[in-house]
Amino acid sequence: MTNDFLGRDDALNQELQQLVNEAKRYPTDSKNPTDRAKRRIALNKLINAIDGSGKLSKQVQWLESPNYEDYYYEALQLTFIEICQKIEQYNPQYPVMAWVNMIFSRRISDVGKKDKKRGITQIPKHQQVAQILSLDEINKDFPADNEISDHQQLKEIIENDPENVLENDCIKDHPQANLKAILLLVLDGKQWKEISEELKVPLSTASSFYQRRMRKIITYLKKYI
């Protein structure tokens, strides 16, 4: 039985290393559009393989945190972004998943510390709530050739929600206040006060819920743009 597990781990690592090497073939600073496209495709394959490997760390050191699920998924998205940006730094002497989980552990620690520092779960009444990010502001995080530029296209993707990711992610005990509903209100130009009233949730709760999932939202939507 142990040999079977080791054999599966070796096979997984070989598969992941092949995908890493494929992505490395195309320089990140290449001016060739075809090379850039091939690099993105290879990185997408790698991320999908990592996500479906069953070998991502559960980050048990954060299990007791009331915000564990939020921390986990925000850190996971940050990890995927860092892997894509720093794929050349991977050392093939170590298993790919060991490298991935090392980054993941650091990012969830960063997320947890940042959350505690800003006290996001208890925003003081006098503190200004973060503004809703516009599409232009969201796009600043990504290369120009990948910008979300078509408002109607974006709205259709959110409404269709191909994987039901947005509709299934909601504020606790408020199924109507899910990411899909919030994003559609954001696209309609609603302010947090209006969003809060329409979804019947506290303003600070809706704002913090949205802000903490920003990376997850962008990563998901860009798969369909």
Image: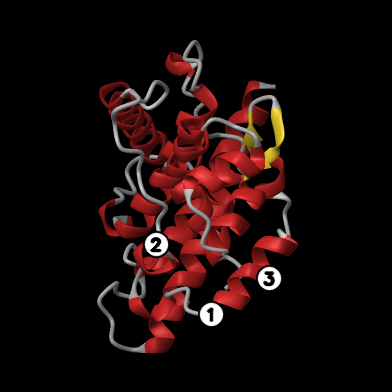
Q: Which label is found at residue 4?
A: none
Image quarter (top left, top right, bottom left or bottom right) of the N terminus: top right
Viewer-proximal residue among 186 and 150: 186
Q: Is residue 160 above or below residue 110?
A: below
Quick one: SS at disc 3? helix
Q: Residue drawn at (50%, 48%), measured in percent from left and top?
A: 216
Relative horizontal placement of residue 17, taking residue 106 as reference (left or right): right
Q: Residue drawn at (39%, 21%), measured in percent from left and top?
A: 122
Viewer-proximal residue among 135 and 22: 135
Real-space Cα separation, disc 3 to disc 2, in angstroms: 18 Å
Q: What type is the residue that disc 2 sits on?
A: Ile
Q: How many marks?
A: 3
The residue labelled by disc 1 is 150
How many C-alpha atoms fall within 10 Å of the one at disc 2: few (<14), some, or many (≥20)? some
Q: What type is the residue that disc 1 sits on?
A: Asp
Q: Residue drawn at (39%, 45%), measured in percent from left and top?
A: 78
Which numbered disc, 1 or 2, marks the residue that appears first in the sequence? 2
Q: Residue drawn at (54%, 30%), measured in percent from left and top?
A: 202
Q: Position of residue 43 (x, y in %)?
A: 46, 63
Viewer-proximal residue among 112 and 212: 212
Q: Is residue 165 above or below residue 143?
A: above
Quick one: SS at disc 2? helix
Viewer-proximal residue among 181 and 27: 181
The residue labelled by disc 3 is 156
The residue labelled by disc 2 is 138
Q: Residue furthest top?
A: 64
Real-space Cα separation, disc 1 to disc 3, in angstroms: 10 Å
